Image (cartoon, rainbow, N blue to C red):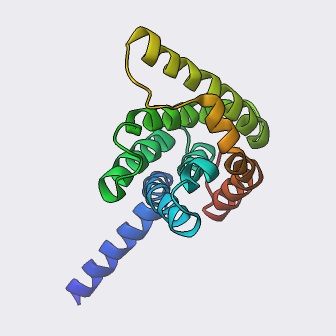
């Protein structure tokens, strides 16, 4: 009887931990990190090798994390998605990995900061624009200041190629984030 009571107490503590705000942040960050790893793979399988550059699937999990959980969570999602995706699938290519990591962290931080001041749509549009400007600055510094190779990475080319992904982000990300936030009852 005492063992059964102790078991119930342990289960209650686990439920309380998982339903607490901190628990929701941790579980949400882990789930979005997994999505950030799985979604690009799914796009590559369904739409081919260039699907990542076209549909920007890794960005989706990072942007959703930024809108729901903020900068720390979305930066963790960005870092873990890029690193574990590379370790598990070899993508992004090792030469592109640091650039992709920097790009996603820029979006994570920008969107989480802007979302505190503006609605999610305005924040997302500003992030998409400012993020690419900052990313262009990173590439410029990598090439001209540090003398690093960029392996053909171009912000202009990535914008043109990624237009379908940008449209998906604008249409889906705020709606998905709002729906999840309401579903998990996470106060702003």
Q: Residue at x 46, y 53 (%)?
A: 29
State whether residue 42 is above or below residue 174. below
Work out whether residue 104 can be spotted.
yes
Q: Position of residue 179 (x, y in %)?
A: 70, 61
> Which sits in the foreground, 61 or 145?
145
Horizontal side of residue 157 vs 29, given as left or right: right
> Which sits in the foreground, 186 or 157?
157
Q: Position of residue 188 (x, y in %)?
A: 65, 45
Work out whether residue 116 can be spotted.
no
Q: Position of residue 108 (x, y in %)?
A: 55, 37
Q: Position of residue 45 (x, y in %)?
A: 51, 68
Horizontal side of residue 170 vs 19, given as left or right: right
Residue at the farthest left position? 3
Q: Residue at x 46, y 47 (%)?
A: 77
State whether residue 71 is above or below residue 63. above
Q: Residue at x 56, y 69 (%)?
A: 46
> Which sits in the foreground, 178 or 17?
178
State whether residue 97 is above or below residue 57. above
Residue at the farthest front position? 152
Q: Quadrant of residue 123?
A: top right
């Amino acid at each position: 009887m005492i063992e059964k009571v102790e078991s119930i107490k342990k289960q209650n503590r686990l439920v309380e931990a998982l339903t607490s705000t901190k628990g929701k942040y941790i579980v949400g960050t882990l789930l979005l990190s997994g999505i950030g790893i799985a979604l690009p793979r799914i796009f590559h399988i369904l739409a081919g090798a260039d699907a990542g550059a076209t549909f920007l699937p890794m960005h989706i999990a990072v942007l959703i994390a930024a809108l729901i959980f903020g900068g720390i969570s979305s930066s963790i999602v960005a870092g873990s998605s890029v690193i574990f995706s590379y370790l598990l699938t070899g993508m992004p290519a090792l030469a592109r990995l640091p650039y992709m990591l920097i790009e996603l962290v820029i979006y994570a931080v920008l969107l989480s900061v802007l979302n505190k001041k503006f609605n999610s749509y305005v924040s997302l549009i500003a992030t998409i624009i400012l993020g690419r400007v900052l990313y262009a600055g990173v590439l410029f510094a990598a090439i001209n200041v540090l003398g690093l190779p960029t392996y053909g990475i171009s912000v202009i080319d990535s914008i043109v190629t990624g237009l379908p992904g940008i449209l998906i982000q604008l249409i889906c990300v705020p709606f998905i984030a709002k729906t999840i936030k309401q579903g998990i009852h996470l106060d702003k």
